[in-house]
Amino acid sequence: MSPPKYHPGERVVVLPERGNSSVRPGIYTITRVMPASPDGIQYRAKNEMDTHERVLLEAQLRPASAVAPLGDGGRAARNGPLDVIRRGTGSS
Protein backbone atom coordinates (compact mmCIF):
# COMPACT_ATOMS: atom_id res chain seq x y z
CA MET A 1 0.00 0.00 0.00
CA SER A 2 1.27 3.50 -0.77
CA PRO A 3 2.33 5.90 1.99
CA PRO A 4 -0.25 8.33 3.44
CA LYS A 5 -0.88 11.52 1.43
CA TYR A 6 -1.68 13.61 4.51
CA HIS A 7 0.04 14.13 7.85
CA PRO A 8 -1.00 15.46 11.28
CA GLY A 9 -1.62 19.20 11.20
CA GLU A 10 -2.55 19.33 7.50
CA ARG A 11 -5.91 20.81 6.50
CA VAL A 12 -8.10 18.82 4.14
CA VAL A 13 -11.58 19.07 2.67
CA VAL A 14 -14.08 16.25 3.07
CA LEU A 15 -16.18 15.94 -0.04
CA PRO A 16 -19.90 15.21 0.20
CA GLU A 17 -20.77 11.58 -0.56
CA ARG A 18 -24.06 10.32 -1.88
CA GLY A 19 -25.81 8.11 0.61
CA ASN A 20 -23.46 8.99 3.49
CA SER A 21 -24.91 11.77 5.59
CA SER A 22 -22.95 10.75 8.70
CA VAL A 23 -19.86 12.70 7.61
CA ARG A 24 -20.25 16.46 7.47
CA PRO A 25 -18.51 17.96 4.42
CA GLY A 26 -16.09 20.77 5.16
CA ILE A 27 -12.57 21.57 6.27
CA TYR A 28 -10.88 19.21 8.70
CA THR A 29 -7.43 19.08 10.30
CA ILE A 30 -5.66 15.72 10.31
CA THR A 31 -4.88 14.71 13.90
CA ARG A 32 -3.53 11.19 13.31
CA VAL A 33 -2.78 8.65 10.60
CA MET A 34 -4.55 5.41 11.48
CA PRO A 35 -3.76 1.85 10.42
CA ALA A 36 -4.91 1.02 6.91
CA SER A 37 -8.22 -0.76 6.48
CA PRO A 38 -9.26 -2.97 3.56
CA ASP A 39 -10.84 0.21 2.11
CA GLY A 40 -7.58 2.20 2.23
CA ILE A 41 -5.61 4.56 4.43
CA GLN A 42 -7.58 6.08 7.31
CA TYR A 43 -7.11 9.33 9.20
CA ARG A 44 -8.46 10.78 12.40
CA ALA A 45 -9.47 14.37 11.65
CA LYS A 46 -11.17 17.23 13.48
CA ASN A 47 -13.90 19.30 11.80
CA GLU A 48 -13.16 23.02 12.07
CA MET A 49 -16.84 23.97 12.36
CA ASP A 50 -18.17 21.56 14.98
CA THR A 51 -14.83 20.35 16.49
CA HIS A 52 -15.88 16.68 16.30
CA GLU A 53 -13.21 14.15 15.39
CA ARG A 54 -13.99 11.49 12.83
CA VAL A 55 -12.25 8.60 11.10
CA LEU A 56 -12.07 9.32 7.37
CA LEU A 57 -10.78 7.41 4.38
CA GLU A 58 -8.13 8.99 2.18
CA ALA A 59 -10.49 8.69 -0.82
CA GLN A 60 -12.90 11.13 0.88
CA LEU A 61 -10.27 13.87 1.19
CA ARG A 62 -8.73 16.62 -0.93
CA PRO A 63 -6.04 19.13 0.08
CA ALA A 64 -7.62 22.27 1.55
CA SER A 65 -5.56 24.35 -0.86
CA ALA A 66 -7.54 22.78 -3.73
CA VAL A 67 -10.79 24.50 -2.70
CA ALA A 68 -9.54 28.09 -2.86
CA PRO A 69 -7.38 28.30 -5.97
CA LEU A 70 -5.51 31.49 -6.70
CA GLY A 71 -7.33 33.77 -9.09
CA ASP A 72 -10.82 32.73 -8.00
CA GLY A 73 -11.75 36.37 -7.48
CA GLY A 74 -12.43 35.85 -3.77
CA ARG A 75 -15.42 33.56 -4.39
CA ALA A 76 -14.19 31.00 -1.86
CA ALA A 77 -13.93 33.66 0.84
CA ARG A 78 -17.44 34.99 0.11
CA ASN A 79 -19.25 31.72 -0.49
CA GLY A 80 -17.23 29.30 1.60
CA PRO A 81 -15.05 26.40 0.46
CA LEU A 82 -17.94 24.05 -0.27
CA ASP A 83 -19.31 26.41 -2.93
CA VAL A 84 -16.14 25.77 -4.92
CA ILE A 85 -16.60 22.00 -4.49
CA ARG A 86 -20.26 22.17 -5.62
CA ARG A 87 -19.32 24.13 -8.74
CA GLY A 88 -16.54 21.73 -9.69
CA THR A 89 -12.85 22.49 -9.91
CA GLY A 90 -13.14 26.14 -8.94
CA SER A 91 -11.51 27.42 -12.11
CA SER A 92 -12.87 30.63 -13.53
Image (cartoon, rainbow, N blue to C red):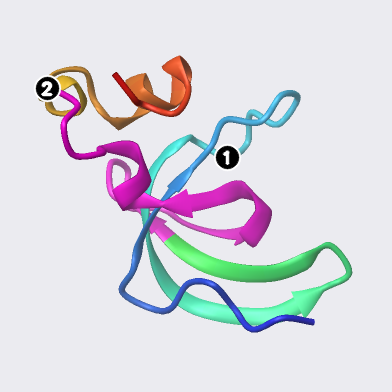
Residue 73 disc label: 2
- Closer to us: mark 1 or mark 2? 2
The percent position of residue 88, horizontal first and vertical second, equals 48, 22
Does the magenta segment cover residue 60?
yes
In the picture, measured across the screen, residue 79 lies left or right of residue 53, that is left
Which x, y percent locates residue 7?
A: 43, 78
What label sits on residue 23 in the rendered view?
Answer: 1
Three-letter amino acid code of the residue under disc 1: Val
Q: Is residue 7 above or below residue 86?
A: below
Cα distance between the residues tagged 1 and 2: 29 Å
Residue 40 is inside the magenta segment: no
Q: Which residues are magenta?
A: 46-73
Residue type, numbered disc 2? Gly
Q: Quadrant location of residue 41?
A: bottom right
Q: Quadrant of the N terminus?
A: bottom right
Left or right side of 75 for 13:
right
